[in-house]
Image (cartoon, helix red, strand yellow):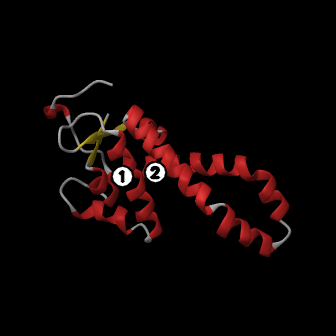
């Protein structure tokens, strides 16, 4: 991936970040639906069974898939599929280059934590200069236009 000069960097808009978020969550949801389709169909007529499936059987696979998806794509491509569509990318906040796999992992875990606490970690991005969300802070990253 091409490294840009700092004068070429422009923070991604909150709108493009929101669009990328929706696309990425739809992709992960479709993958989970495909993997667990038979279980979902089997539980569709029994509300207790469906609640059990959602509460117990889907939570850890969903969290794991999200962490793997975001860690891999941010580390390898500098952007998830949603971010590629939205024409934004993630860079290291310190040296403005490629994100390490460890920072990418920390960012992915920070994103899960933000989701678990009513998306408050996302809202932080509205109130700081770098539009940094909780997961940008934990991963030491910035989201910029591609």
Residue at 64% across / 46% down in the picture?
Answer: 31
Query: Which residue is drawn at the image coordinates 42% and 66% (left, top)?
Result: 119
Q: Is residue 44 above or below residue 72?
A: below
Q: Quadrant of residue 127?
A: bottom left
Q: Is residue 111 above or below residue 12?
A: below
Of marks 1 and 2, the one in the foreground: 1
The quadrant where residue 53 appears? bottom right
Residue furthest out toward the left: 7
- Locate residue 92, reporting x and y percent: 25, 41
Q: Compared to 134, does 86 lie above or below?
A: above
| Residue for badge 1 | 106
Residue underneath mark 2: 21
Circles 1 and 2, Cβ within 8 Å, touching? The answer is: no
Structural crowding at the residue carrying mark 2, measured as other residues with C-alpha within 10 Å and reported as few (<14), some (14–19) or many (≥20): some
Q: Is residue 128 left or right of residue 41?
A: left
Dot 2: element: helix
Residue 58: % across, % down? 65, 60
Image quadrant containing the C terminus:
top left
Q: Earlier in the sequence, mark 1 or mark 2?
A: 2
Q: Does residue 84 appear to the left or right of 53 in the view shown?
A: left
User: Residue at the front extreme?
Assistant: 102
Label 1 packing within 10 angstroms: few (<14), some (14-19), many (20+): many
In what element is the residue under mark 1?
Answer: helix
Quadrant of the rendered structure where residue 4 is? top left
């Amino acid at each position: 991936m091409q490294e840009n000069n700092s004068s070429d960097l422009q923070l991604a808009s909150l709108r493009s970040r929101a669009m990328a978020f929706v696309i990425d969550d739809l992709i992960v949801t479709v993958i989970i639906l495909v993997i667990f389709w038979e279980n979902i169909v089997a539980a569709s007529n029994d509300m207790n069974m469906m609640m059990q499936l959602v509460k117990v059987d889907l939570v850890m696979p969903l969290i794991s898939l999200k962490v793997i998806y975001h860690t891999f794509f941010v580390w390898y491509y500098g952007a998830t599929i949603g971010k590629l569509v939205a024409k934004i990318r993630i860079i290291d906040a310190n040296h403005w280059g490629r994100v390490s796999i460890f920072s990418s992992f920390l960012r992915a875990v920070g994103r899960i934590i933000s989701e678990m606490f009513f998306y408050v970690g996302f809202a932080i991005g509205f109130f700081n200069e770098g539009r940094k969300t909780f997961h940008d802070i934990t991963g030491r990253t910035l989201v910029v236009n591609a």
